[in-house]
Image (tube, grey):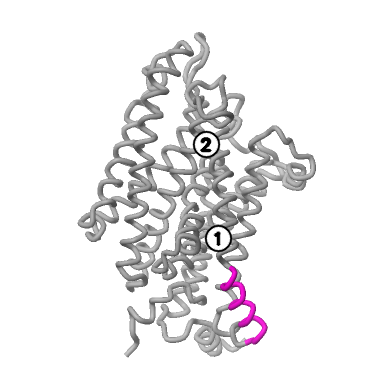
C-alpha cells in the first residue's frame, strides 16, 4: 500500500470535525503499548502451557494478585452499570455526554476480568465446565454467569459506538441498526444493573462466608453477609470516580476539553453521596466486626494488624484517605469545581476501593489463624505481574483506537471548534 494513502484513509475513518494527533505519533504509541501487550501475552502462554507453577502462589495463597486485579477492575468498571442506571433508568439526561466513555471503560474492565480468570483457571479449554457442570451451591458460579452475561450486555452497548464510525455509518443497514439499538438501550441498562448488583455482591460474599478466615468473615442478613452489600455499594460509589479520572486523564493527554463541567459535576456529586453513605456503612461494619465478631471468635483487633505489611495504616488508608476525604470533597460544590481537589478525590476513591479489594483477597490469606502459624507473605512472580499489566496495555490500546475512530465524546466538537 502506498504510504501516502495511509493518512488519507486515517482521516476518512476519524469522526467528522475533530482533530487527532498525526498518524506517525499514533502509530508510535500503538507500538509501545503493543510491545507491553505482547510481553503479557508471552507470560500468559507460559502460564497456560507450563502451568500455574509459573506463579508464586502456594498452599496459603490459592489465589492472589490475579484475583485482586480481577476484583479491582470489576469494581472500577462499576461506573458503566451505575452511570447507565442513572442515565437510562433514573433519567439523568446530562450523563448522555459521558455514558459512551463509561461503557467503553466498563467494556475494558469486564473483558479484562474475564481474561484474568481465563489465565487463573490454568486450563482455559476447560473453562466451559463452570457453565456446563455448574456447582449450584457456589457463589462463584453465580459470579461467572452474571459476569459473562454482563460482559455480553456491555458488548451490546459498545456495538452502536462502533457502528457510528464515520465510514461504517454510511452503510444504511448499520446506520439503522445503531439507531434502533440506541432506542432500546434502557432495557440493556436495566439488565446490566441487575446483573451487576448480584455479581458485585457475590464477590464480596465469598470472603464474608469464610468462617475459617476470621478477617473476612462477616455476619449479615439471612444468607447474605454484610460484604455482599458493601461490595456492590462501593462499586457504585467508586466506579464513576474511575470514569471521571480516566476522562480527566484523557483530557490532559489530548489537551482538549471533552466533557462539560456540569456533566462531571453531576456524576461527581452523585458519586460523592454514594461514597459518603458507603463509608458510613463500612465504618459501622468494621466497628461491629472488631467489637463483636472478632472477640466471639477468640481474637483481638491487634491480631489482624500485627504485621508491618498489613499494619493498622492500611485500615486508615482505606477508610479515611480512600473514603472519608474523597467523600467530603465530592459532596461539596467547591471541592468538585476545583480541578485539583477533584483530581485528589477521584484518585483517592480509586485507591480506596482497590485497597479494599486487596485486603479482602490477600490479607484474608495472610493472617495466621492457628497459634503455631506465622504471617504468610507473598510476592508475585514476573509472570503474574506481566499478565496483570496485560489488561492495562490492552485497555490503553482500545481507548486510543476508540477515541481516534469513534464518536465517544458528543460534546468534543462544541468544546473544541476547528477554525
Place of residue 93 in the rendered image (x, y in percent of width and height, measured from the top left):
42, 68
Q: Single out the residue that lies furthest toward the right.
A: 132
Figure check: 69 above or below 105: above
Dot 1 alpha-carbon crowd within 10 angstroms: few under 14, some 14 to 19, many 20 or more: many
Dot 2 alpha-carbon crowd within 10 angstroms: few under 14, some 14 to 19, many 20 or more: many
- Apparent side of residue 260 relative to residue 373 in the rendered image (left or right): left
Residue 304 numbered tag? none
Figure check: 160 above or below 66: below
Place of residue 269 in the rendered image (x, y in percent of width and height, measured from the top left):
32, 55
Residue in the picture at 38% in, 81% down: 413
Place of residue 60 in the rendered image (x, y in percent of width and height, measured from the top left):
57, 24
Q: Secondary structure at mark 2?
A: helix
Q: Secondary structure at mark 1?
A: helix
Q: Which residue is mark 1?
A: 189
Figure check: 200 above or below 4: above
Pick the quarter of the image with the C terminus.
Answer: bottom left
In-front residue for pair 47/179: 179
Q: Earlier in the sequence, mark 1 or mark 2?
A: 1
Residue in the picture at 61% in, 72% down: 181
Pick the quarter of the image with the N terminus.
Answer: bottom right
- Apparent side of residue 305 relative to residue 119 in the rendered image (left or right): left
Where does the magenta region start and end? Answer: 171-184
**Magenta span dominant secondary structure:** helix
Place of residue 224 in the rendered image (x, y in percent of width and height, measured from the top left):
55, 32
Residue in the picture at 59% in, 63% down: 187
Residue in the picture at 52% in, 44% down: 69
In-front residue for pair 310/180: 180
Q: Which residue is mark 2?
A: 228
Amino acid at each position: 500500500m502506498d504510504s501516502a494513502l495511509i493518512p488519507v484513509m486515517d482521516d476518512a475513518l476519524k469522526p467528522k470535525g475533530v482533530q487527532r494527533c498525526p498518524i506517525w505519533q499514533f502509530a508510535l504509541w500503538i507500538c509501545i503499548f503493543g510491545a507491553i501487550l505482547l510481553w503479557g501475552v508471552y507470560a500468559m502462554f507460559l502460564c497456560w502451557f507450563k502451568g500455574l507453577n509459573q506463579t508464586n502462589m502456594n498452599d496459603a495463597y490459592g489465589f492472589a494478585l490475579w484475583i485482586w486485579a480481577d476484583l479491582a477492575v470489576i469494581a472500577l468498571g462499576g461506573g458503566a452499570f451505575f452511570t447507565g442506571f442513572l442515565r437510562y433508568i433514573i433519567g439523568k439526561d446530562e450523563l448522555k455526554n459521558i455514558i459512551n466513555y463509561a461503557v467503553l471503560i466498563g467494556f475494558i474492565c469486564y473483558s479484562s476480568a474475564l481474561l484474568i480468570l481465563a489465565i487463573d483457571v490454568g486450563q482455559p479449554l476447560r473453562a466451559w465446565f463452570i457453565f456446563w457442570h455448574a456447582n449450584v451451591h457456589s457463589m462463584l458460579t453465580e459470579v461467572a454467569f452474571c459476569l459473562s452475561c454482563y460482559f455480553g450486555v456491555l458488548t451490546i452497548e459498545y456495538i452502536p459506538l462502533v457502528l457510528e464510525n464515520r465510514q461504517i455509518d454510511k452503510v444504511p443497514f448499520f446506520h439503522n441498526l445503531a439507531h434502533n439499538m440506541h432506542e432500546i438501550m434502557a432495557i440493556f441498562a436495566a439488565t446490566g444493573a441487575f446483573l451487576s448488583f448480584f455479581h458485585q455482591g457475590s464477590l464480596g460474599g465469598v470472603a464474608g462466608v469464610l468462617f475459617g478466615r476470621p478477617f473476612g468473615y462477616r455476619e449479615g442478613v439471612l444468607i447474605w453477609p454484610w460484604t455482599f452489600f458493601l461490595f456492590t455499594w462501593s462499586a457504585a460509589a467508586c466506579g464513576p470516580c474511575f470514569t471521571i479520572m480516566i476522562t480527566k486523564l484523557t483530557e490532559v493527554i489530548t489537551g482538549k476539553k471533552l466533557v462539560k463541567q456540569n456533566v462531571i459535576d453531576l456524576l461527581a456529586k452523585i458519586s460523592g453521596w454514594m461514597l459518603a453513605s458507603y463509608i458510613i456503612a463500612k465504618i459501622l461494619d468494621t466497628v461491629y466486626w472488631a467489637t463483636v465478631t472478632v472477640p466471639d471468635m477468640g481474637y483481638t483487633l491487634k491480631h489482624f494488624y500485627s504485621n508491618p505489611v498489613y499494619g493498622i495504616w492500611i485500615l486508615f488508608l482505606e477508610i479515611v484517605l480512600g473514603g472519608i476525604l474523597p467523600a467530603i470533597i465530592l459532596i461539596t460544590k467547591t471541592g468538585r469545581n476545583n480541578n485539583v481537589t477533584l483530581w485528589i478525590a477521584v484518585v483517592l476513591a480509586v485507591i480506596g476501593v482497590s485497597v479494599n479489594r486487596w485486603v479482602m483477597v490477600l490479607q484474608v490469606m495472610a493472617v495466621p489463624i492457628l497459634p503455631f502459624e506465622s504471617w504468610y507473605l507473598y510476592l508475585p512472580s514476573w509472570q503474574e505481574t506481566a499478565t496483570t499489566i496485560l489488561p492495562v496495555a490492552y485497555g490503553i490500546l482500545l481507548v486510543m483506537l476508540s477515541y481516534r475512530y469513534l464518536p465517544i465524546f458528543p460534546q468534543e466538537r462544541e468544546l473544541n471548534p476547528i477554525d
